[in-house]
Image (cartoon, grey):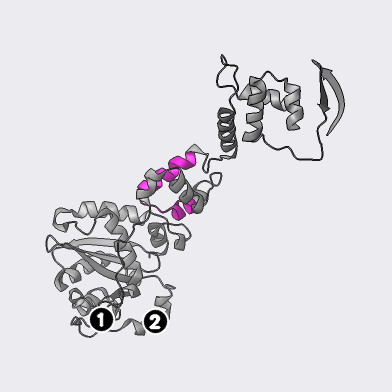
Amino acid sequence: MFTRTFTHRSVVIKKFTPKSPEKYTQLTLAEREEISLGRNSNTPVCEIAAKLERSPSTIYRELKRGRPCKNNVQYRAHKAQMQSDERKKASHFRERIPNKEIKAYIVDKLRQGWSPELIAGRLAKDNRSLKTNYETIYQWIYEDRPDLFCYLVRHHKKRRDRGSAKGKRLPKVLYRTMISERPRYIDNRKEFGHWEADTAISRQSKAAIMATVERKTRFLLVRKIKSKSAPCMHEALVKCLGEYPLRNRMSITYDNGTENAFHLATNNCLNTKSYFCNPYHSWEKGSIENRIGILRRYFPKKTNWILITQAQIDKVVKEINSRPMKRLGFRTPYEAFVALRS
């Protein structure tokens, strides 16, 4: 509001009285151009303020901030507008993860293959004073640290249709008990000591690996085998599970590959029961499929298993078993397995 007036150099100028009920607004580019024109024509600041219905102190502050440099007294509207936009942007910027210790923890665990969800869950468990959530970690990676994107969960170039294998010849594995006959308490992972088994092959050689996972704890065991054959599969399972007490190895669930043809011999050695997925329903043993998928992060599909030592495999398996899982209350498979093992 403009109330009183006074005379300055024969010009009658209304004195500015701020409109207290109204909210202050930033100067616009048009107003800055008026300020620039006024100063270039030596118009008094009070007159410029009156014309723009702004406080003279606002104009003085704008002139002080909007000069290109200290030695140049000329005010430039567009330069001042750019500076204003930069100040506004900086004032709204809030670092998603300001704590350096949390950043270092996230980067370290990402490089170990942990997901943001696992990192957030375990961070709260390890140090309650350092907390963040997995969505914040994802946003931080995508917006602030794209160099870490490569450490996120694997991506499939193409997903195979689950029904695409229909019509293929079924493998000959005799005396199978189908998964539909498996007790509900095994399906629900209520009881400890039930395993899933599978293999991962090499395109460059006959060498392969046998992998087996305990369903309740997701504890993984892997052994290198000479070939994807029934005798090699049987021998590897007996060596892996034979060292544990009977109650730690009560059943094994397989797919219908011919490498599982010696399942009855395995049962005789380990005192286990065997169950088989429906043909081409590999997702019915999802735990081992998931674990092998994680193994493939370390050993891609083009890996020649004959060149990989058992020691190298053991090192990776130890790392996987030491990674916390949300399903386990952010405990590691190793911690969960040891707690239940006899």
Up the image or down, 280 lies above or below 19; here it is: below
Q: Nearer the viewer, mark 2 or mark 1?
A: 1
Indicate the quadrant containing the N terminus: top left, top right, bottom left or bottom right: top right
- Separation of marks 2 and 1 at Cα, in angstroms: 27 Å
Residue in the picture at 45% in, 43% down: 144
| Location of mark 1 (residue) | 166
Residue in the picture at 27% in, 67% down: 241
- Is 57 within the magenta? no
Chain part drawn in magenta: 101-122
In this picture, residue 4 sits left or right of residue 230 = right
Which of the 4 image quarters holds residue 287? bottom left
Question: Is residue 174 or residue 93 the one in the foreground?
Answer: 93
Structural crowding at the residue carrying mark 1, measured as other residues with C-alpha within 10 Å and reported as few (<14), some (14–19) or many (≥20): few
In this picture, residue 175 sits left or right of residue 52 = left
Q: Main secondary structure of the magenta part?
A: helix
Q: Name the spot of residue 341 as percent of width and height, x first.
A: 38, 64
Question: Is residue 325 or residue 304 the one in the foreground?
Answer: 304
Q: Name, please, the residue furthest toward the left.
A: 205
Q: Name the spot of residue 16 as percent of width and height, x first.
A: 81, 28
| Location of mark 2 (residue) | 183
In this picture, residue 78 sits left or right of residue 232 = right
Any mark on residue 22, and which?
A: none
The amino acid pointed to by label 1 is Lys
At mark 2, the secondary structure is: loop
At mark 1, the secondary structure is: loop
The amino acid pointed to by label 2 is Pro
